[in-house]
Amino acid sequence: MDTPNIAQASDNKLHFLDYWRIIRIRKTVIFAVFLLVVITTTIVTYWLPKYYGSTVRISVEKDISDIPGLFEFRQAGSSYDAFFLQTEFEKITSKTVLYNVITNLNLNERWAKRFGGGVTLKTPETFMLLRKHLDVRQFRNTSLIEIKVLSEDKDEAPEIANKIAEVYRETRLTNRKEASARGILVLQDELTLQEEKVKKAQAAVDDLREKFNISESQADSGQVSTLEPETVRRLENSRIEAMTAYGQMHSTMTNLLKLSKEDLRVALPTVSPDVFLSELFSRYALAEQELTTLRKDFGEDNPQVVRSKQLLEKIDSQIESKVAGILAGLKIKEAGYKEDLDLRTAELERAKTLDVDNAKKYSGFAMAKRDLDFQKQIRQTINMRIIQEKVDTKLPKSSIVEVVDRAEPALKYERPRVTLNIILGVIVGLAVGVGLAFFIEYLDTSVKTIDDVERALQAPVLGVIPQNVGFLMDEGPDSPHAEAYRVLRTNLMFSRKNEGINTITVVSGGAGEGKSTTVFNLATVFAQNGQHVLVVDSDLRRPSLHKFLKISNAIGLTNYLLKQKTLEEVIQTTKQPMLDFLPSGKLPSSSMGILNSTRMREFIKDVRARYDVVFFDSPPIMGVSDASVLASEVDMTLLVVQYRKYPQMMTLRAKQMVEKVGGHLMGVVLNNINISQDSYYYYYSGYYYDYYYKRSDESAEKAEEKDKKAIGDQAKADLKQKY
C-alpha cells in the first residue's frame, strides 16, 4: 500500500517560541550554572584585597612660555590637541617618569614585604606593579589629565599620585631647557659658518663691479641699466607699424589686379582719389550721352556722329592712360612700404644682438649680487632666532604643567566593586547558562519535535503521548491520558486506504521507548470503542504484556506455533470487554526463528478473519530480526519514538529496516513527552485534560450546589407546613 503523503515541513528557521522551549527544558542547567557563577563571583569579590584610589588632576599645555616670546603671535581660543594629550599619556607612564618616582619614594623597599615576600624588589619589577595600579585618562575633552593611583594603603595612593605629577612637571621643564640650550649652540655654530659665506659673496661682487666699471648706485640696486632694452621695444613697435602699412597696401594691390577693366575703373577712384580722372569720367559720360542723341537723328556716316565717336574714343584713351598711371604709382608706393619694413627689421635685429651681448656681460654681476643678498638674509634670520631662543629660555613656563587638584586620601575603597561585580556575575551567569543550554541542545541529536520526525523520516506523526501514562484498562475510559490514544486511533483509522487491513505491529528502534505500553493502551481504546481486539505478545525474548494483566506466560503463542495447543486454548480474555490477549509463551532455545514460519503466516491470516483489529507487540527492530519478520507479514506498522532518548539516525535506520523488508509504515508515535517542560506539545495532550476534565469538575460542583439548594428549599417548606 502507498505511504500517506506528508505535508512538507514548515520553515526550518527557529521561532522565538522554539528558543523559549529550549530554555524551559534546560532550565535546571541554566539555573545551576547561574548559581555557580554568581556564588563564585560573590566569594571572589569579597575575598579580593581592598584598593583605595586617589586622583591628581593636572593641566597640560604645549611647551610655551607664560607670555608670548619675541616675534611670537598666539591666536585666541583653546589649544586642545588630542594627539598631543595622547602622547603625554604615554610619557606619564614611561620609565623616565616612573623610575624617578620609584627612586624618590623608595618603593623598591616599601613594597618588598607586600609584593616581594620581604626581598627588595628590582626597579623593573616595581615599575610593572606601579603601571598595573596606575590609570591616566583625559577629563571631558579638555587639556586636563587625571592620574589615578590604586593602593591597599589609602595614604600611600595620594602620595604616589602627587609625586608622579611633580616628577612629570620637572621632567617637562628640564627637557625644555636642555633642548633650548642644545638648539642655541647649534644655531651659533651655523651663524659662524654663515659669516664666512657672506664674506666670500661680498668679495665676488666687488671684483665684478670693478671689472665692468659699475657705479656704486647700480651696485647697491643690483641692476645695471642700459638703453638697449628701450631701443629694442621702440624699434619693435616701429617695425609692427611698417609691417601693418605694407600689409594693407599689398592686400589692396592684390585685389585691384584681380578686377576686370570696368570694375577697376569703378574701384580705383575709391582706393586712390584723382581729380583729373574724375573729370575724365564726367566728360566720358557727356560724350557718350551726346553720341546716343545724334544716333537717334542721324546715321553712322554723319559728320557729327563721326566727330562724337572720335571724341569718345579719345576720352577713353585718356582714362586708360590715367588708370595705368595710378596703378603704377600704387606699385611704387607698395615697394616703398616693403623697403621701409626691411630697414626697420634690420635695425631691430641689430638692437636685439646688442641687448643680448650686454645681458651676457652684466649677468654674472647680477647673480653674484643676488647670492650676496640671500646669504645676508640667512645670517640675519639665524641671528634673530638665537636672540629669540635666549629670551624664550629665560621666560617662565609654569603653565605647561599645572596641578589643578592635588590627590587626597580616599574615604572608602574603590576596588573591588561589589555591586558591579555581582551584577556582571548575574549577567554572565545567565549568558553562560543559556549558552550552555543551547550548546547541549545543539549536541542533542535525538527527536525533540514533530518537525524533527517529519523532516528526518518523511513520515507523519499520528500521535503524541504524554509522560507518565498508566494503563488505560486500570484508569478507565475517562482517564486524562485516554484522549491522546483516541487521537492516535482516529489518525490510524483515517490513514488506512483499505478498511480490510486490520493487523498492526508496533516497533521501535531501541529498547525502553514505550512500545509495549503503546500497544496495550491503543488496543484498550479500540476495545472501548466497541471493536473486537486481539493483542499478541510476539516479543518472544523479553515478553512484558502478561505482566500488565498479571497472568501467567506459561502457555501462549509459541505453544500454538509448535502445534502443542490450539488457538482457542492459548487466547485469554481480559476484564476489558472485547479485548483478548495472547501471551508469548515460553520460547525453546531450539526454535529461535519460529516467527518466520508458515505456521505464523497462517496464524496471522486466521486472526485477521476472527478479529476487527489485531495488535502485535515486537522486540526492538535494531537488535532482533523478529520485528522485521512481523513488519513484513502484517498489514500496518507503527514506529514508536521516545522523546529525547535516541539519536535521529537510529530512528531513521529503524524506518529504513521496515521499508526494506516490505513493511507498510503508517506513521510515527512520539512517546513520553514532558508537557510541563515542553509547552510545544501542550495542544496535543494537555488541551483535552484542561478543557474536558476541568469542565466536568465544574459541572459536578454546580450539580452539588444545586442539590444542596433543593434540600434547603424543601426544609424551609416543611417548616412552613409544620408551624
Image (cartoon, rainbow, N blue to C red):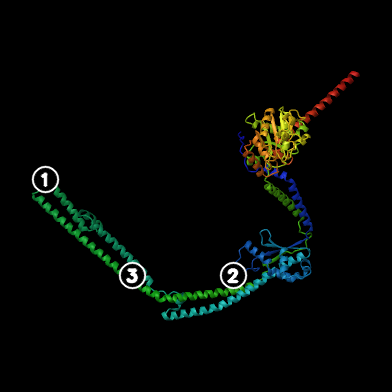
Farthest residue, direction top:
721
Can you identify the residue that label 3 sits on?
Answer: 348
Q: Nearer the viewer, residue 497 or 444?
A: 497
Q: Measured from the top left, where is residue 459 in percent x and y? A: 63, 38
Q: Amino acid at mark 3?
A: Leu
Question: Residue 715 or 530: which is nearer the viewer?
Answer: 530
Q: CA distance from mark 1 to mark 2?
A: 113 Å
Give the distance between the C-alpha atoms of the residues marked 3 and 1, in whole angstroms.
Answer: 71 Å
Q: Secondary structure at mark 2?
A: loop
Q: Is residue 723 left or right of residue 608?
A: right
**Side of 372 where 292 appears, left or right:** left
Numbered disc 3: secondary structure: helix
615 vs 446, nearest the viewer: 615
Q: Nearer the viewer, mark 3 or mark 1?
A: 3
Report crowding for label 1: few under 14, some 14 to 19, many 20 or more residues within 10 A (C-alpha): few
Tag in front: 1 or 2:
2
- The residue pinned by badge 1 equals 297
Residue that carries the numbered disc 2 in the rendered image: 71
- Chain-order first, disc 1 or disc 2: 2
> How would you rate the neighbour count of disc 3 (Cα within 10 Å): few for under 14, some for 14-19, many for 20 or more?
many
Residue 428 point in image, percent of width and height: 72, 52
Above or below, comparing residue 139 to residue 671 in the picture:
below
Quadrant (top left/top right/bottom left/bottom right) for the N terminus: top right
| Count of numbered circles in the view | 3
